[in-house]
Image (cartoon, helix red, strand yellow):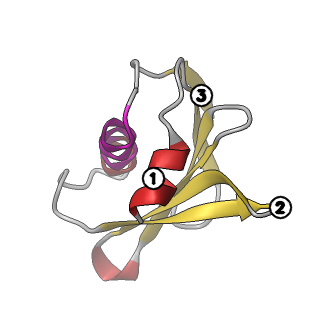
Amino acid sequence: FMITLAPVIQTLDQLREYVNTTLCEHNQLEIGEFPLTERILVRFDRPCGIFFCLHGPRAVKLSAIWETERNTVLFYGSTGERFHKTQLVEAPRLDLATANG
């Protein structure tokens, strides 16, 4: 898999867009055609990342995990293999996400 530096991502909306685009492009899916769900990951009662799941055609599920401690996004294909890793330059504020949802 490849490791890349992401464009500067400062908001959770930018992170969502980046994750959605990367998952769609890797799987040749139309961007914006499939729902992207997310769940806040918690460790020791503190948010530590976000699990994203793109619900593609024919029950295909593609996922990505933003891990806040290392500020990386790990991308996984439909069979669970990791196909991409992105090191974020800046981290969006996860505490804002938990406050809103």
Residue 16 in the image: state x and y as whole percent: 36, 47
**Sequence-earlier tag: 2 or 1:** 2
Which secondary structure lies at badge 1? helix
> What's the CA distance linking mark 2 and mark 3?
31 Å
Residue visible at 33% across and 49% down?
A: 20
Position of 69 with respect to 22 (left or right) is right
C-beta proximity under 8 Å, tags 2 and 3: no
In the rendered image, which residue does mark 3 sit on?
2
In the rendered image, which residue does mark 2 sit on?
44
Residue 100 in the image: state x and y as whole percent: 39, 59
Q: Nearer the viewer, residue 56 or 72?
A: 72
Circle 3 packing at 10 Å, graded few (<14), some (14-19), many (20+), is few
Among the 4 quarters of the image, the one containing residue 44: bottom right
Q: Which mark is residue 97?
A: 1
Give the amino acid type for the residue marked by disc 3 in the picture: Met
Residue visible at 53% across and 29% down?
A: 91
Give the amino acid type for the residue marked by disc 1 in the picture: Ala
Which secondary structure lies at badge 2? loop
> What's the CA distance linking mark 3 and mark 1?
28 Å
Circle 2 packing at 10 Å, graded few (<14), some (14-19), many (20+), is few
Q: Nearer the viewer, residue 67 or 47?
A: 47
Q: Nearer the viewer, residue 96 or 69?
A: 96
Give the amino acid type for the residue marked by disc 2 in the picture: Phe
Using the image, determine if residue 77 lies above or below residue 11. below
Specify the segment rendered in magenta: 11-21
